[in-house]
Image (cartoon, coloured by chain):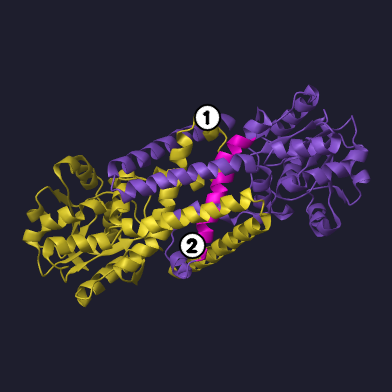
Chain colours: A yellow, B purple
Amino acid sequence: MFNKLCIIGVGLIGGSIAKTARLQNLATVIVGFGREDDVQNLQTARQIGVIDAYYLDIAVAVADADLVIIATPVASTADVLRLLQPYWSANTVYTDVGSTKGSVLAAAQAVFGQVPDNFVPAHPIAGAEQSGVLAAVDGLFANKRLIITPVETTDTEALRKIQRFWQGLGSAVSVMEATHHDQILAATSHLPHILAFALVDMLGHKDEQSEIFKYAAGGFKDFTRIASSDPGMWTAICEANKQEILPLIDQLQMELAKLHDLLAADDYSQLFATFAYAKTARQRFLEQFDKQQNQLQ
Amino acid sequence: MFNKLCIIGVGLIGGSIAKTARLQNLATVIVGFGREDDVQNLQTARQIGVIDAYYLDIAVAVADADLVIIATPVASTADVLRLLQPYWSANTVYTDVGSTKGSVLAAAQAVFGQVPDNFVPAHPIAGAEQSGVLAAVDGLFANKRLIITPVETTDTEALRKIQRFWQGLGSAVSVMEATHHDQILAATSHLPHILAFALVDMLGHKDEQSEIFKYAAGGFKDFTRIASSDPGMWTAICEANKQEILPLIDQLQMELAKLHDLLAADDYSQLFATFAYAKTARQRFLEQFDKQQNQLQ
């Protein structure tokens, strides 16, 4: 489908894109770009065949590429776009994988004055706690959702190409506005991560923490899994989506205050009603989740 | 080891005890007791061979039993003890599986004036979101922790028998004071459950909930798994351990307020430090968890 795919940042996500794109014949040549301090990772990526070559010179890396994917942490999108700007080509489609999309559009606007027509912001809703190319796997995006957040001026042909590319990687592609994406992800991903970090930080500061952890079981392990995510990446996501996240923290605090007060007041019928509502709501989520998995497979 | 084991309440926990006890030859005869409205479940339990017989008459059920296990929801412990009282025998060891232990001791004290010497309160740290005897599995307690919370007057021989019984079911047995148990479980189990219920309740009340759930991924599924737990059981646990849970909700509120304020103030270095601390703390938990699993296996 593409002749030369250039991946900026060959980590877990970039590496998994490369691996799957190669297996699915979505690109003839796949190259990587990184900075000096990323050389070891890039060498590994080439050695294990995830990429065909890597370059530390952006001009060489993107020369003749018809697809450029920015797969660096979301905080560095502006820097990467600034790096790409002198070599920006009308014959190339550009996309990214950032977890927040308003911040990515803002970065593009800041660098280019307006979002380039051939830049198609996208976000694969997939990931893991690990990072680096050795964590990359073929199939990371299979049966997962991918959201594209174009602007009014986005070239429809470029959008169509990114859509097909991700469908080729196995994803179910949705298109929506960036602000809408950021609202949804704040609720389903950013808030839960903050909650998990908050709980483990709080317990980890207790004098009896080693005993607490000693008697914690599988439920605790699952619940706190996302607290093992990369702190730098999540700080950047919080910064980028601050406006959506802050009111959600407020809402959750109100919810916790409600539960606290119900318990303090021995209002067990209301407490039961709240728990029962949550169980039913999660059941709705599970049914939708399973249905999607079946549809996507 | 025991001649006749009587299980009061043959659900997920009671049924799993029966299944494993039979396989491990820990009891010659295993019978169940339940109320009229539990007859269908008891019939199933007998049909699938989890128990040898069941009785709706407590006198018959516990006659000649040398081990009686109360495996009903924690809120009904007092009622069950009251039912057992006329037939209480010095030749029998009694135990329970309640998730909160202070409330169980209080129930025993209320019914008997003081905790009987041959009543050994215990709590297997294992479970699942399902309930009923059909969810029971052999091995539910293998490599899991079990906590015994005796009082000063608890008969050491009775304690030893319960300890050996649970070791026979595959558990790693610890002994500690009930108040200490309740503090630890409030942190590792009760608070996370409340948090999961709170998050899903909050999101489930949003107008855009179906879209939120549509784009929620595996991380959300894991994080909210415990929000599918039984609302009645968790209301009872909250009631029984209210004194330990309320201050923990307060502490978590303060922690969330801290994160909120750091983000609002753009203090990303402190936000990063908090996330990084949590990640490291969870790593300590994981290492301990894995070490235990290896030791127990």
Q: Are marks 2 and 1 in contact (CB under 8 Å)?
A: no
Task: Answer above or below: position of B181 versus A147.
Answer: above
List x then y, in percent, for residue A288: 50, 67
List x then y, in percent, for residue B184: 58, 35
Task: Answer above or below: position of B211 versus A200.
Answer: below
Task: Answer above or below: position of A89 versus B29.
Answer: below
Q: Amino acid at mark 2?
A: Leu
Callout 2: residue from which chain?
B
User: Does B199 appear in magenta?
Assistant: yes
**Residue drawn at x 90%, y 46% as measured from the top left:** B58
Q: Amino acid at mark 1?
A: Glu
User: Does B237 appear in magenta?
Assistant: no
Alpha-carbon span between mark 2 and mark 1: 33 Å
Residue B105: image quadrant is: top right
**Residue drawn at x 15%, y 58% as measured from the top left:** A81
In this view of the protein, which residue sits in the foreground, A200 or A70?
A: A200
Label 2 in the same subunit as label 1: no
List x then y, in percent, for residue B179: 65, 32
Q: Which residue is mark 1?
A: A208
**Is residue B128 among what the camera can see?**
no
The segment highlighted magenta reads B182-205
In this view of the protein, which residue sits in the foreground, A109 or A244?
A: A244
Q: Which residue is mark 2?
A: B203
Quadrant including the N terminus of chain B: top right
